[in-house]
Amino acid sequence: SLFLNGVIDDQTSMEVILGMSKLYSANPKRLITLFISSSGGSVSDAFALYDYTMRALKPKLQTVVLGEVNSMAVILFLMGETRHIGRLSVMRFHKFSLEGSTGLTTIKADQMRQDLERSEAEYVNIITSRSGGKITADKARTFLDNNIAVSAIQAVKLGLAHRIL
């Protein structure tokens, strides 16, 4: 088992990547369980972990939400072939932002905006595909635009989770 607790940054994503790699190399057929409780964090670090897991390693993975998963932590939860959510857990969605970016030139700000739009589009695609089509792209964008919080029961109905613990 692995645990992702707290903000997603370069350190936490690398810890999960290394832990998953170690478990996978010890036994590629073994089920790996990733427990997640996170307020989200870095878009690039979360996507790096997602790409490594889903496109490079491809382990047999089960994910479990305990507490809450917000923002980029949602797509990490969606990596699981089977996804379980605590009865009192919550998933939160919100628009991507340029928070913490000061002293930007207009050119750099425009490039960052384009990167955020591209990342947000990929985020929407992941939600749509991993929900088994129960959440359309328009509905996923509505979740982001309106800062939607999804309960465990709603997560199962929407295809985001398979079972409530």
Image (spheres, rainbow, N blue to C red):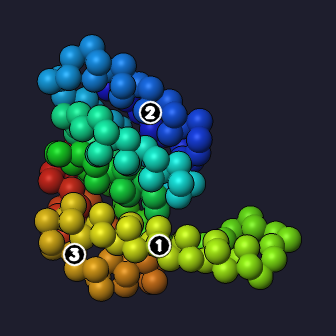
Image height of 109 relative to 44, above or below: below
Image height of 165 relative to 121, above or below: above
User: In the rendered structure, which disc, 1 or 3, sits on the residue that comes first in sequence?
Assistant: 1
- Residue 49 x, y percent position in the rendering: 43, 44
Q: How far is disc 1 from disc 2 in space, using C-alphas?
A: 25 Å
Residue 131: quadrant of the picture: bottom left
Q: Circle 2 sits on which residue?
A: 16
User: In the rendered structure, which disc, 2 or 3, sits on the residue that comes first in sequence?
Assistant: 2
Q: Please tell me which residue is depicted at 37% across the width and 62% down the height of the picture.
A: 91
Left or right relative to 7: residue 85? left
Residue 99: quadrant of the picture: bottom right
Categorize mark 2 by other alpha carbons within 10 Å: few (<14), some (14-19), many (20+). Answer: some
User: What's the mark number on residue 135?
Assistant: 3
Q: Helix or strand or loop: what does disc 1 sit on?
A: helix
Categorize mark 1 by other alpha carbons within 10 Å: few (<14), some (14-19), many (20+). Answer: few
- Residue 84 x, y percent position in the rendering: 22, 47
Q: How far is disc 1 from disc 3 in space, using C-alphas?
A: 19 Å
- Amino acid type of the residue that numbered disc 3 sits on in the rendered structure: Ile
Q: Nearer the viewer, mark 1 or mark 2?
A: 1
Q: Circle 1 sits on which residue?
A: 118
- Residue 64 x, y percent position in the rendering: 29, 43
Question: In this orientation, which residue lies closer to the viewer: 94 or 45?
Answer: 45
User: In the rendered structure, which disc, 1 or 2, sits on the residue that comes first in sequence?
Assistant: 2
Image height of 87 relative to 150, above or below: above
- Asked if the residue at tag 3 contacts the one at tag 1, i.e. Cβ–Cβ closer than 8 Å, the answer is no
* Quadrant where the N terminus is found in the figure: top left
Question: In this orientation, which residue lies closer to the viewer: 52 or 30?
Answer: 52
Q: Helix or strand or loop: what does disc 2 sit on?
A: helix
